[in-house]
Amino acid sequence: MKKKVLVLVLISSVIFLVGCWNYIEMKDRTFVVGVGVDLVEDDLIEVTTQLLKPHEIGVPAAGEPTPDADPVWILSSQGETVFDAVRNFVRQAGRKLFWQYNNVVVFSEEVAREGILPFLDFFVREHELRLGQKLVISKGEAGDIVGAKHGLERIPSMAIVDMLEEEEAMGGIVNVDLFDFLEEVNSKAGAPVVGTVENLEGARLDVEGGAVFKGDQLQGFLDKRETRGRNWVVGRVVSAIIVLEWEEDQKLSVEILRTNSSIEPEFRDGRLVIKVEIETEGNLGEQQTAVDFTKLDRWYSLEKKLVNSIENEIKDIIELAQQEFRADIFGFADEVYRKYPQEWRRIEDEWEDEFASLEVVVDVEAKIRRPFIIRTFPSLD
């Protein structure tokens, strides 16, 4: 009996030791919350990190002021590969980096034009990293973005995540993580769009627009309107403010509240046609004119203006994608493959040319609610 007890104790000890062989005390970890990747001289890669200072993070007691100390340490390291640069941080930090709480990965425009997958490999392969980290492309050096401050958020990487989510709701950016990007790279269309960030004058971060890829190589950028046009098609406009012009210098703001979109491929006389249907609904949020929109003819005219505005945004970005980028940023190819797998095999190898000359029919239906009158103006016509 004593021997059996001894054996059980030994087995338990071995299991405990094996389970904790790589345990590291929290005080010995250096937490990464944001990272940027740039190319520098001598074919080296520079990795810039936001490292959390745990002793500077905390909620002040009631009545106490928010601490002024910077809660992050900006540190850069260089190497021949991303992994090499990461390991070289030990020389400065004196500890290994801990990646589990990283929020965002920023790649510079230069890195993205080279082809992003070789630089992305470490972030996918490292077991501590999550594929849910946000991915953005910087206009300029990624290190400048990682090192920028934010007036409201003490941890800048969290500010970037918040701005991505808020701007996404307005349709003016593409908010993707590592998993989304890899999925789109490997899709039939193979043309991801990634959010962009820029460090403006005064160290202000601006999160707006999209970076167009063909495969893993950056092709160019979209502005806010072009990005929203793309987002209408793929169903990623959750909310938006659309400014319409009733007459010269008389503007109105419509708040989009709900949107549904669908992409339907079909063959007409042997020719592929894509039908894009958008249904949207919004409220009249502001009018800078004394027009009485409770009158049905004017209300219908206002809805028609909204339809035209959305259609123009969509048609402009479709033309840009077809003629300038020749990149299927809408995922039309995947819809064709799902509905017509045999026909897709026939056109797959020539999809870039097929897409560039593809007929796209856009149909928008828009409803505006809340036609009541607010007596802002002295009289209504």
Image (cartoon, rainbow, N blue to C red):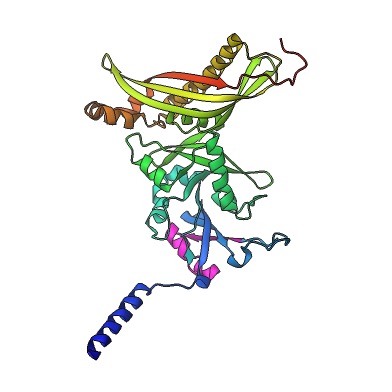
**Relative to the observer, which residue lies in front, 225 or 254?**
254
Left-right relation of 219 to 250: left
Residue 371: name its quadrant.
Answer: top right
Vertical position of residue 193 compared to residue 20: above or below: above
Image position, residue 293 (x, y; %): 63, 14
Left-right relation of 354 to 321: left
Image position, residue 305 (x, y; %): 56, 16
Residue 197: name its quadrant.
Answer: top right
Is 274 covered by the magenta stretch?
no
Image quarter hosting the C terminus? top right
**Residue shown at 55%/28% (left/top)?**
256
Q: Is residue 227 visible?
A: yes
Vertical position of residue 94 compared to residue 147: above or below: below
Image quarter hosting the N terminus? bottom left
**Residue shown at 52%/20% (left/top)?**
367
**Residue shown at 44%/62% (left/top)?**
84
**Residue shown at 45%/72% (left/top)?**
24
Which residue is the extreme one toward the bottom?
2
Vertical position of residue 176 compared to residue 274: above or below: below
Left-right relation of 73 to 274: right
Chain part drawn in magenta:
72-96
How many numbered marks, from 0 up?
0
Image position, residue 295 (x, y; %): 62, 11
Is 81 covered by the magenta stretch?
yes
**Relative to the observer, which residue lies in front, 17 or 273?**
17
**Relative to the observer, which residue lies in front, 109 or 43?**
109
